[in-house]
Amino acid sequence: MNNLETFEKNISLEFKNKELLLLALTHRSYLNEHKDAVENNERLEFLGDAVLELIISNYLFKQYPDRPEGDLTSFRSALVRTDSLAQTARNLGVGKYLRLSKGEEDTGGREKDYLLANTFEAILGAIYLDQGYDISEKFVYKNLVPKLEEIVANRLDIDSKTKIQEVSQSVYKTTPIYEVIEEKGPDHDKIFTVVVKINGKVIGKGVGGSKQKAEEQAATEGIKYIEKESN
């Protein structure tokens, strides 16, 4: 349990039931190589997802009394999306303590966004079961909520693809087109390269582990190009 105790220090919490924390850190691949392990963290992830949504919704409702429901939903979505939760998990050192199969570890499992984000939710589910709502809320307020100020101030909740569509229609009176120009790697670990075009011209390129992520990155580059051209 030494590793668990170190991780508890990282997150500034001491679990009453250490097995809950151990379970939260157990990816389903681990069970393939360790027959003594009978459960993975997916049920805790399910619970943690619901707890997280309630905590963030409650915070936004109280913090932004003049904002409409649409804005609050958008802010919440930006805060709890995969890359945001994954970065928070990295800040807490989650990857180091994950229980994975050798195969999953060899393919970079300790740094995969979706895996880290899911584990963050599982940890929150474990905290809720072990210590209740108030401690869960404090954990989220300390580790995740500080990101909201920048999200709201800079409207980071409006994703790059939505932004570039608005800007493109305003400046060029047309809609951007995305094109996958390369796919590499096995089916379970593909890397996509996508370009975004306006009037047939490439204005941005992105690379990611899914088409959506690659398109988002391409759109971000495309926005920079349009802003530079229009100034």
Image (spheres, rainbow, N blue to C red):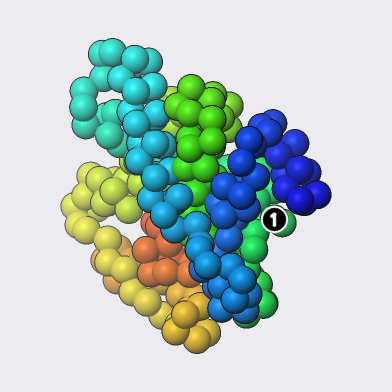
User: Can residue 26 be seen by looking at this rendering?
Assistant: yes
Q: Residue 127's x, y, as percent? A: 53, 37
Other residues around mark 1 within 10 Å, as few (<14) / some (14–19) / many (≥20): some
- Residue 107, compared with residue 198, is above or below; it is below
Q: Judge from the rendering whether residue 139 lies leftward or rightward of residue 218; answer left or right.
A: right
Q: Position of residue 174 (x, y in %)?
A: 20, 57
Q: Residue furthest right?
A: 2
Q: Which secondary structure, mark 1? A: helix
Picture coordinates of residue 30, whole percent (x, y)? 59, 71
Say which of 111 and 129 sits in front.
129
Q: Please determine whether, in this image, residue 113 is positioned above or below residue 183.
A: above
Q: Is residue 218 visible?
A: no
Residue at the image point whose x is 57% and y is 47% from the top = 20
Residue 39, position as x, y percentages in the image? 50, 63
All told, the count of numbered labels is 1
Question: Nearest the camera: 80 or 216?
Answer: 80
The residue at the point 29 percent across, 28 percent down is: 72
Q: Residue at x 21, y 50 (%)?
A: 169
Q: Nearer the viewer, residue 5 or 151?
A: 5
Please state, as top left, top right, bottom left or bottom right, where the C terminus lies in the image: top left
Quarter of image, res 109 = bottom right
Circle 1: residue type: Tyr
Residue 210, by quadrant, is: bottom left
Which quarter of the picture shows residue 5?
top right
Residue corresponding to mark 1:
97
Above or below residue 104? Residue 51 is above
